Image: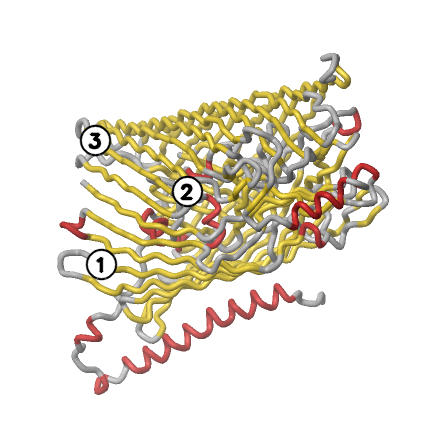
Amino acid sequence: MKKLTKTSIRVITSVALAVGLPGIASAQNASQDAKPEQKSPPTDEQAGEPEKGFADIIVTARRREEQLQQVPVAITAFTPSELATNNITRMENLTTVVPGLNVSPAQHRGNVPGFAIRGQRQDAGFLTNDPSVGVYIAEAVQARNFGLAQSLYDMESVQVLKGPQGTLFGRNTTGGAILFQPTKPDLTQFSGYVQGRLGNYQRADAIGVLNVPISSTLGIRLAGSRTSRRGIVRDVSSGGYRMGENTYSGRATILFEPSENFSNTLYLDYINSNDKGGSATRLTAVNPALAINATLGPVLVSQTARLGFYEVEGNFPNTYSRGSNAGITNVTTLALSDDITLKNIINYRDIYSRERQELDGTALAVLALDQKQTARQFTEEFQVQATGFEGKLNLIVGAYYFRETGDVVTLTYAGAAAANPRRGVALNVSKSVFAQADYKLTPNLGITLGGRYTWDERRLDQQLRSAATGACTFCAIAQTASDAPTYTASINWQVDSDRMIYLVTRSGYRSGGFSSSANNAAALAPFQPEKVTDYEIGLKADWTLFGGPLRTNLAAFHSNYSQIQRTILGAVAGVPVTTIFNAASAKVDGGEIEVTYRPVRPLELIGTAAFVSPKYKSFMDGAIDRSGNTFAYIPHETYRLGARLTLLEGDDGSKLLASADYYWQSRVYQAEFNTPLNLQKAYSLVSGRLEYSGLFNERVTIALFGRNLTKTKYFASTGDSYTSSGYVYRSIGEPRTFGAEATIKF
């Protein structure tokens, strides 16, 4: 028998404690309750104890509405109030509250978040490669993440699904999927709210929402957001700032529901981002062994040593990151009978981005980038949902089509090297069919079987031209195609109304593609699809511990990956070049723990943990064996402790709530080739919120908030080309932020 890993031991021990201790406590409570002579009328203090159980959270992990605790999938979900209480206003904030999830900005692209779940992460800012975590907005996939960093406003729910979701959510979900559901119109009443937020670094945000029921069958909901912040990193050369925010966004949702059998929801959304100053990256190391750095290196080291952590000394004028993201989604549902429902989801999205970035943060011309990208996507999904056998069977059958076109134009400046323009024109097409059935063998025992088959095609017209003559120095057209089946099989046992155990195995598939910066035939060779098979055991349970409700959601998993896709930063003629290749195979073991406990009614305690132990089975970089490396951007351990204390609760519905959270993550390498130069040491973050809600007839809420209150300094991402072009540059993480917020409902 194989030896248990430390990760496995931790997860198993945690599961045992979570299952055993509450059971003992429940038994003790039951034993005490069995003695009538010990019972007495409740005192005033006892009357303030928590009500039994937790509020139901509705999720759509299986493409239909279900209660969170009854779905055999590892999910972390948030309601609007939970998003507010946890200070979740940006995508990166999800990292500290979702075990197993890591969100960090793509290299030098602060408004393009990169998601990692259970060891799987890939920057997917470009058309030639795809992510490992699928992002869905209003049930439609968003292939490119531009502009998503600040789009968490007026959301009905946010759901993080962990593990491969290849059957119901398709390709490119080998790590999981994140579902963002905007709030739909309420057809019963006119309502809305406005919210303002002020904070340090000249933070000034505003949100406005208006819900208008035009009739009993037609309604519209309008929501808009404005985020503005001065940069947090000072450019000592110009006196300006970088890492600022300047985003406008809006959403219109129209609901037409003429009967119980038919509904049509139209979503129109738009984001415009113009972050003056762009991202803030600093050169942190140079390779003196390379001839180009023999004299440059000491100058850079001396210059960088004079700067504070939140300072750069720029040389590239007028840096910025700007663009737009516009989409239209239509969801139509038609119930043909009590047992058969048709659903159609159609989406079109148009994305434009332009960035001009300095990567070294020094007064010398070392590294800079000028890039423009356009992307247009169209998706169509048709579903037939059915129930049968007196409600024992739930069936979904569907077909999916995806088409994406666009181009990327890049100029990379590296020292004295000429910035030869590179343009790639891409076409991506994906088709699939799928089916999944859930069946109740007994009232307490259920099984799930599902499958999907996907066909992908990709084409890239790559052009590299001379800056001096305009002549094409490398021009080629590359094509690749692939197909693969994926499946889901699970069994779940509802032990009683409060506890469920499930076992599941799934396969996932991430499409192949090309390296967008390829400048020769060898670099343009396609990388192959990535495949994963995972095995998971989970427990979802509600208990009573010493009179208070306790919820424990636990999961342990093992994943096998083949042809795993990895990104490295190299150089050709001194110019940094990003290359994606297949790093053979790997395995990932780990687990997540989520515990919520209310010992007394005013107090809620939260504890989460995630353990991830990724290991390459083989990873050959030419003649170098890198199988001892760990995965980039994946901390092996993360922990969170949180508390919510109701300090005051008035008869008029007002409530004063104090919240505090502590998050810790272990050290993490921020490049595929692990070295001390791209290592981010373990660090912790502390956040808090003091909220007074329900004022003035439950219409006004005021709050104070803060994040990174202990002023932790850390790097969010790294570009490491130390052995190729000879540089390492790193993006600076968020400093301490704080402010005040007011919300008025009407």
Q: CA distance from mark 3 to mark 2?
A: 35 Å
Is any part of residue 258 visible from this angle?
Answer: yes
Whether the residues at callouts 3 and 2 have beta carbons within 8 Å, the answer is no
Q: Nearer the viewer, residue 517 or 367?
A: 367
Disc 3 vs disc 1: which is toward the camera? 1
Q: CA distance from mark 1 to mark 2?
A: 42 Å
- Where residue 655 appears, as percent x and y from the top left, is 22, 58
* Residue 176 higher or lower than 710, as above or below: above
- Where residue 699 appears, as percent x and y from the top left, is 18, 47
Q: Earlier in the sequence, mark 3 or mark 2?
A: 3
Residue holding disc 2: 394
Residue holding disc 1: 655
Secondary structure, mark 1, is strand
**Amino acid carrying mark 1 in the image:** Lys
The residue at the far bottom in this view is 37
Crowding around mark 2 (Cα neighbors within 10 Å: few <14, some 14 to 19, many 20+) is: some
Residue holding disc 3: 212
Q: CA distance from mark 3 to mark 1?
A: 28 Å
Q: Residue at x 34, y 26 (%)?
A: 266
Residue 594, quarter of the rendered image: bottom left
**Amino acid carrying mark 2 in the image:** Asn
Q: Earlier in the sequence, mark 3 or mark 1?
A: 3
Tell me the quarter of the image containing the N terminus. bottom right
Q: Nearer the viewer, residue 435 or 347?
A: 347
Whether the residues at callouts 1 and 2 have beta carbons within 8 Å, the answer is no
